[in-house]
Image (cartoon, rainbow, N blue to C red):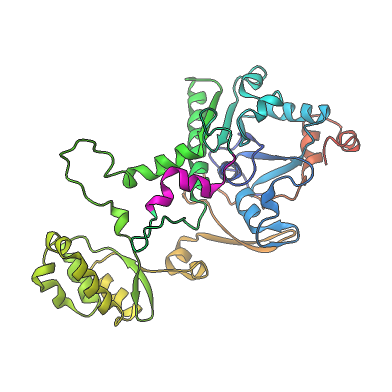
Amino acid sequence: MTTNTGPLAGIKVVDMSVMISGPLTAMMLADYGADVIKVESPGLGDLMRFLGTSKGGMTGLFSLNNRGKRAITLNVKQAEGLDVLKKLIADADVFIQNFRPGAMDRLGLGYDDVKKFNPNLIYVSVSGYGPTGPNSHRRVYDNVIQAASGMAAVQTDPATGAPGMLRNLVCDKVTSYTAMQSIISALFARERGIAKGQHLTVAMLDSAVAFLWPDGGMDAALLDDDVTRMPTLGSNYSVTKLSDGYCAGSAVSDAEFRGWCAALGHESIADDPRFTSAKNRGLNIDALVATMAKHALEANLDDFLRVAEENDVPASRVNTIADLPSDPQIVHNEVFVERAHHTAGNMREVRPAVVFSDTKLRVSRPAPMVGEHSDEIVSELGLDAAHLRSIGAIS
């Protein structure tokens, strides 16, 4: 068995969350070395077990958000099942839930209830809009928060004026990263004696706006009437269509612009008086876009990238998902890990993104099946697994 050297080794996490915002948080804690126990209700449990591509009762979506965990199925509507959950929480360092505000209070497991028997617990409540306010009661998914946070508006198509969605659950995931960072900070504060347990409330809306604002809000940050307003950096983002593929890049400085023109095979464009400086290029942007697009359609992708590199111009081909496992830099970085899941077969996963020199991170155990570790977990609590199973408290 591989020794757990992760920085969170010895930390116990009870994960009662579903979908992505909570489960991905807990999965990253597991990758960092924590012992994570996923608690699911009888019946459907976490709906991510049923969405998307699947094999052997395991979906790719569930697996990629729940590896490293042990799973228990608990009927918390039954007194003995609820008692098991309380015992798990009493022994935990971190508890994560992402039900709508008030749900845990009705179970008698709100923060004020739990801190009475575990004052050192880091209690994490993830919700769509936050615990209070006019929208706090509303059910959300990622696309709803993309709309509410301004994320969809930033994706507005300049040609049609229609806002657009990122085809990626960015708000769920940025909430997870926000929650994980906060949990580790709270654990550090507890370790230093600054605080005991804490209640961390993480709203998807707040996380998404905080993620968007450093560049998306660059124009809106300065409030006086006499400021010089410019478009946001991201508003100029687009892909370049070449004769045999697509690329993306940036030519901000005059040297980079000249290099971009050279990569297109038309370095003389950089000598056109309309384009000789960033200011001139801005004043003649329509002519510039039309000129560059025309010559891009004549350029070969490999040749363009080669000359761009020679001229120190930032550029990359547009990789598809299928391209990623064979991308030379991704292969060199050993980003992907391939291994066998005991029911889903061969899988490709991504290792934790950060490389630690000493407290080595791990690609933790494969995602669990429903209730896979129920008996093991309750036995660790000193409880009779056979009895709890016979009365339907666990399954």
Q: Is residue 63 above or below residue 177?
A: below
> Where residue 371 appears, x then y in whole percent?
77, 45
* Left-right relation of 54 to 171: right
Q: Residue at x 82, y 40 (%)?
A: 375
Q: What is the magenta segment's predominant secondary structure?
A: helix
In this view, the residue in front, 65 or 269, is: 269
> Where residue 122 appears, x then y in whole percent?
57, 28
Tell which residue pokes out farthest to the left in this image. Answer: 273
Residue 91 appears in the picture as rendered: no
In this view, the residue in front, 307 or 11, is: 307
The quadrant holding residue 301 is bottom left
In this view, the residue in front, 236 or 76, is: 236
Range shown magenta = 139-154
* Left-right relation of 174 to 262: right
Picture quarter with the C terminus: top right
> Where residue 306 appears, x then y in whole percent?
30, 75
Q: Is residue 125 magenta?
A: no
Q: Is residue 246 above or below residue 1?
A: below
Q: Is residue 143 magenta?
A: yes
Q: Residue at x 50, y 59 (%)?
A: 335
In this view, the residue in front, 65 or 191, is: 65
* Left-right relation of 270 to 59: left
Tell which residue pokes out farthest to the top in this image. Answer: 116
Residue 95 appears in the picture as rendered: yes
Q: Residue at x 31, y 80 (%)?
A: 297
